[in-house]
Amino acid sequence: MLKQLKQKAIAEIKQAGDLNSLEKVFRQYLGRKGELTQVLRSLKDLSAKERATQGKLANQIKKEIENILEQKKYKIRDTKYELPKEWLDVTAPGVPMPQGHLHPITLVQRQVEEIFQSMGFTVANGPEVETDYYNFDALNVPKNHPARDLWDTFWLKDLDLLLRTHTSPVQARYMEKNNPPLRIIVPGRCYRHEATDASHDVIFHQVEGLMVGSDVSAANFKGVIEEFFKQFYHTDVKIRLRPSYFPFVEPGFEVDVKRKGKNWLEIMGAGMVHPNVFKTVGYKANNYQGFAFGIGLDRLAMIKYQIDDIRLLFTNDLRLLKQF
Ligand code: PHE
């Protein structure tokens, strides 16, 4: 009779599909009024001998049922928390995040910085909102001088400030604080109040260069610039200097570059630093000489990446930007 009870209990445990029905089975056999509990209670009415054998068997069965119940409980719990198969495939390749791109101007600027740094130049900076003193006066362009018309300037209303028209003011700012020998480049944004077309925008970028020492010559300039373009284009180049005018240099030149099989390209203004500029920043007259140049960074980028309209560089059109 006890063995039948056990079989029945085990069969019911097997059938129980969830914790609730399992709990019912427990109460059915081991609860306060459970079938097995009642058997155990009635043991006291038996003879001592019977009590011993029946008692032993009943307790053994109780333990067995408890064990099976426990195991089934874990099994139900495990299946309950088991993750659905399709929830996560850890071997699936990830979805690539869309990547940002460096702007062509940034790419070219970094390359230019690297090349000049390899030649001992330091990267310096200056403000884009400038005083007219640094943008003009300190560069040998006095107030009311017609040479100011060389640069169409954005003036800040009612203030003595302007958006710098070139990176040259940083020449004066740097020399005021540093003595020769010095070698710097100054990459940065410039602004001109001009009509825009494919090669002119109101915003553009220059890299100013300045090298000053006791005997820095125009030949040094040619050497440095030739080396720069060699490294920039990864090929031999020819350099041509044409006389030009900038108030802060004397003599001044326009610099053209030619790669094999290509046309001459006008790429920068340059010259030997004017003695008046040295005087203004407080250098002793005749002690120093040096060269300065201003490369159009946008021009370099346009040539390098074959972009035919400068305005494309500032419209933030993703179709262009994503190509870099
Ligand atoms: N600052 C000049 C310009 O923007 C370029 C230049 C720089 C010329 C340095 C000579 C020396 O037009």
Image (cartoon, grey):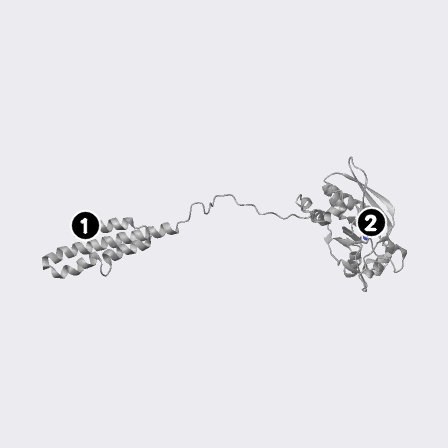
Q: Residue furthest top?
A: 261
Alpha carbon separation for disc pair 1 and 2: 109 Å
Q: Which disc, if any, is residue 316?
A: none
- Local packing at callout 2 (Cα closer than 10 Å; few below 14, some 14-19, many 20+) is many
Q: Amino acid at mark 1?
A: Gln
Q: Amino acid at mark 2?
A: Ala
Q: Nearer the viewer, residue 26 or 185?
A: 26
- Local packing at callout 1 (Cα closer than 10 Å; few below 14, some 14-19, many 20+) is few
User: Residue at the spot x=85%, y=47% of the render?
Assistant: 253
Can you give x and y, in whole percent of width and height, for residue 300 in the image? 75, 45
Q: Which disc, if any, is residue 270?
A: 2
* Corner quadrant of residue 230: top right
* Corner quadrant of residue 24: bottom left
User: Helix, strand or loop at disc 2?
Assistant: strand
Q: Nearer the viewer, residue 295 or 307?
A: 307
In contact (CB < 8 Å): disc 1 and disc 2 = no
Beta carbon at label 1 within 8 Å of ligand 1:
no
Beta carbon at label 2 within 8 Å of ligand 1:
yes
Q: Nearer the viewer, residue 241 or 132?
A: 132
Can you give x and y, in whole percent of width and height, for residue 266 in the image? 81, 43
User: Of callouts 1 and 2, which one flags the residue occurring earlier in the amino acid sequence?
Assistant: 1
Can you give x and y, in whole percent of width and height, for residue 282 in the image? 82, 61
Residue annotated with mark 1: 4
Q: Is residue 243 left or right of residue 225?
A: right
- Which marked residue is nearer to the observer: mark 1 or mark 2? 1
* Corner quadrant of residue 257: top right
Quadrant that contains the C terminus: top right
User: Residue at the spot x=24%, y=56% of the render?
Assistant: 28
User: Residue at the spot x=69%, y=44% of the render?
Assistant: 320
Can you give x and y, in whole percent of width and height, for residue 46 in the image? 11, 59
Q: Is residue 83 left or right of residue 64?
A: right
